[in-house]
Image (tube, rainbow, N blue to C red):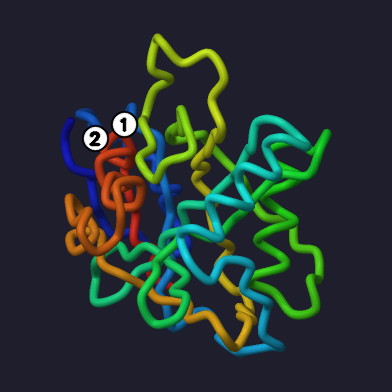
Amino acid sequence: MGRPFFSDMAAAGTNGRGDDGGDQATSPVVDIYPLSSYYFGSKDALPFKDETLADRLYRMKSNYNAQGLRTCVEAVILVELFKHPHLLLLQERNSFFSLPGGRLRPGETDVDGLKRKLSRKLLVDDSENDWEVGERLSTWWRPDFETLMYPYLPPATKSPKQCTKLFLVRLPERLDFIVPKNFKLLAVPLCQVHGNQKTYGQIISGVPQMLSKFSINRVIP
């Protein structure tokens, strides 16, 4: 799989879709804006549910016994910094990285649930925002109560314990990010994330490859 196509465009004039032939003309386009276009603030901390891996696994088992398959949705959000695409990640306890998102409520759709989670974690007072939730980039499965997840459902798995779906979320030109005090919202270069499973985990480290079918346009305000 190739790398994302990266180009510049002015905010006015070309629509960034490309008309010069080649891959850019047929690839889906992601317009990204400078990190400086956004405001970053903080709000009251969110409670941490998991203190240890054992606690988390115990809670997963309890929830599975009560509600069945755990379905999560996560957002892939890009910004521009130093003329390169960067991925927005949340960092917990100065160590653990995650994509913004979380678990769906019973009966909640993927899009509605992701919008709710993004507003809760990234906006002031859980205020609603018309998040532009786009293409599903990948689906990951947890066959059993273990840390390893797969980008496919293993054939022998009859009762998977978790399904996590990644969606591309396109940002507007301006937005105020208000993050809980016990989280950090970081912009990490795609080149740093790529293949770096040791630092970012198997799902996040695969995001650059998931984006290889897109043309990424740096919008110049």
* Circle number at residue 25: 1
Give the vertical position of 137 relative to 15 (above or below).
Answer: above
Sequence order check: which comes first, mark 1 or mark 2?
Answer: 2
SS at circle 2: loop
91 on left or right of 84? right
Residue density around tag 2, few if under 14, some if 14–19, many if 20 or more, within 10 Å: few
Nearer-the-camera pick, 48 or 6: 48
**Residue 20, which numbered label?**
2
Please give left or right for residue 113 compared with residue 137 in the image. right
- Tell me what residue is drawn at x 80 percent, y 64 percent: 128
- Specify the amino acid type for callout 2: Asp
> Could you tell me which secondary element the residue under label 1 belongs to?
helix
Q: Marks 1 and 2, how far apart in space?
A: 7 Å
Q: Quadrant of the N terminus?
A: top left
* Quarter-of-image position of residue 66: top right
How far across and down, in percent of the image, does residue 29 sit? 40, 42
Choose between 117 and 189: the one closer to the eye: 117
Foreground residue among 162 and 136? 162
Residue 80, quarter of the rendered image = bottom left
Task: Identify whether 45 is placed above or below 83.
Answer: below
> In the image, what residue type sits under mark 1?
Ala
- The x, y position of residue 37, in whole percent, is 49, 79
Nearer to us of marks 1 and 2 is: 1
Which is more toward the observer, 134 or 56?
A: 56
User: What residue sits 33% from the left and 50% below the top?
Assistant: 216
How many marks do you count on the picture?
Answer: 2
Based on the displayed image, in which of its 4 quarters is residue 2 positioned?
A: top left
**CB-based contact (under 8 Å), mark 1 and mark 2:** yes
Question: In the rendering, which numbered label is found on residue 123?
Answer: none
**In percent of the image, x 57 and y 19: which residue is there?**
159
Residue at 33% from the left image edge and 27% from the top image edge: 26
Residue 204 location (% of width, % of height)? 34, 52
